[in-house]
Amino acid sequence: VEGLARCLQRVGTDGVVTATRAIQTPPRDNVKLAALFVEALRRRGVEDPGAHLVVVRDFLAICTMAKATPWSPLQIERLRALCRARQLTP
């Protein structure tokens, strides 16, 4: 958690911290990663960690992305467009 909090601090307000893991059945690593990102954001004083997280998957892996600031509506729309174009699941 401390390491992720430091990463979020280092990337600044517009940077993104990402972690990608293979899809597992039952889900394990990606659930843990999401929980770690949420805790790291909470320790930084973020009240709504969900506004700072994005999760995207393809048929092999899941990418969890976090920002120190909330994702803007424009960023979310661009990400959704990219997901549609690349057949990813947001």
Image (cartoon, rainbow, N blue to C red):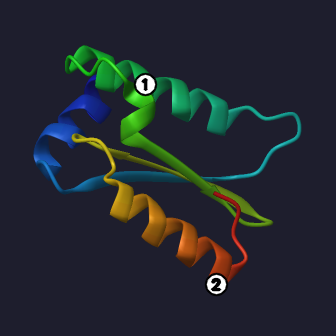
Report the disc number at residue 85.
Answer: 2
Q: Quadrant of the C terminus?
A: bottom right
81 and 46: which is toward the camera: 81
Label whose residue precedes the other's in the sequence (2 or 1): 1
CA separation, marks 2 and 1? 28 Å
Q: How many marks?
A: 2
Residue 85 in view:
yes
Q: Residue at x 53, y 34 (%)?
A: 33
- Mark 1 is on which residue type? Val
Residue 66 appears left or right of 6 = right
36 and 75: which is toward the camera: 75
Q: Residue at x 19, y 34 (%)?
A: 6
Q: To which quarter of the image does residue 69 belong?
A: top left
The correct choice, above or below, for 69 with respect to 44 in the image is below
Residue 28 appears left or right of 36 = right
Report the disc number at residue 14.
Answer: none
Residue underneath mark 1 = 38
The correct choice, above or below, for 80 with respect to 2 in the image is below
Q: To which quarter of the image does residue 27 belong?
A: top right
Q: Secondary structure at mark 1?
A: helix
- Mark 2 is on which residue type? Ala
